[in-house]
Image (cartoon, helix red, strand yellow):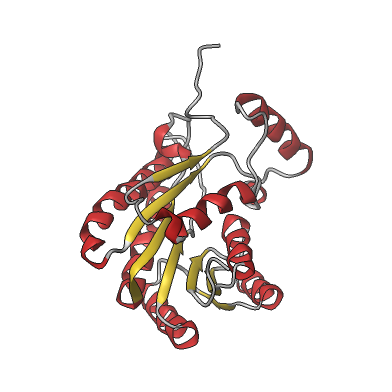
Amino acid sequence: MRFQNQSIVITGGNSGIGRAAATAFVEQGGNVAILGRNTATVDETVQELGVFGQSCNVTDSTSLTQFMSNVVAKNGPIDVLFANAGIAEFSSFEDHDPSHVRNVMDVNFFGTLNTIAAALPHLRDGASIILTTSIANQMGEPDTFAYAASKAAVKSLISTLSREFSPRKIRVNAISPGPTETPIFEKMGLVGDTFDQTKAALSNMIPASRMGKSADQVAAILYLASRESSFVMGQEIVVDGGLTGCNAIA
């Protein structure tokens, strides 16, 4: 198996892409540890997948530090860090509250920094760090200014940290998902017919003619985590069905 006995850490591993990745790593022999804010879904994932898990907010650096120490005690030094936890909150610039911007940046950017900082002393030389960005960092969608800025800031880390960590041969890369069917749409209030209409509209915009599945993102995550990508550093793999790469004038 590709990740036999490797120590894998996933933040946001209790839902959506993070949980799908946790499932795949377990199936590939990895010793997986997950972190999430929702205690109920963390406990459920721990029971269903047989992984180590802890409830924690990535904005809490003290709890993150303790979590990483617990992971090492349980599974050994970390081979793969998937810093995936994040939120999607949107507001028009004209109507925004500064607290909205701070909250989005605190979770998506500073939370990612906190995660990497807490894990760094426990990473094996040659480890793989994978971040989650978003195609929002290269698009001009209304109401996404804070979210897009937070993901652009995360994207900047893949280059700077790959260079900084290169003496230890630690690679930093990212996946950049397009519209993907995950519980995040429920958190945004898009359920039932509203979600179906949104899904149909997005599918018409995407060259692949469908929304993404978590499995589409997981394939890229497993590649970046594996030795197959040992010569890949500082890269963002866009998995969006051609939405950003196949633009055309209608």
Residue at x-position 71% and y-position 74%: 48
Q: Quadrant of the C terminus?
A: top right
Q: Which of the 4 image quarters holds residue 60?
A: bottom left
Residue at x-position 49% and y-position 54%: 223
- Residue 239, how many percent across, how many down? 52, 41
Q: Which of the 4 image quarters holds residue 27?
A: bottom right
Q: Quadrant of the N terminus?
A: bottom right
**In the orientation shown, which residue stands out farthest toward the right?**
193
Tell me if I can see residue 169 in this picture: yes
- Residue 66, how many percent across, how many down? 41, 82
Examine the rendered structure and indicate whether residue 244 appears above or below residue 48: above
- Residue 47, how many percent across, how many down? 69, 78
Tell me if I can see residue 107 in this picture: no
Q: Which of the 4 image quarters holds residue 140?
A: top left
The reply, left or right, for residue 72 in relation to residue 3 is left
Residue at x-position 46% and y-position 48%: 175
Label tally:
0
The reply, left or right, for residue 116 in relation to residue 22 is left
- Residue 50, how many percent across, how many down? 65, 78
**In the orientation shown, which residue stands out farthest toward the top?**
250
The reply, left or right, for residue 240 in relation to residue 167 is right
Residue at x-position 78% and y-position 42%: 192
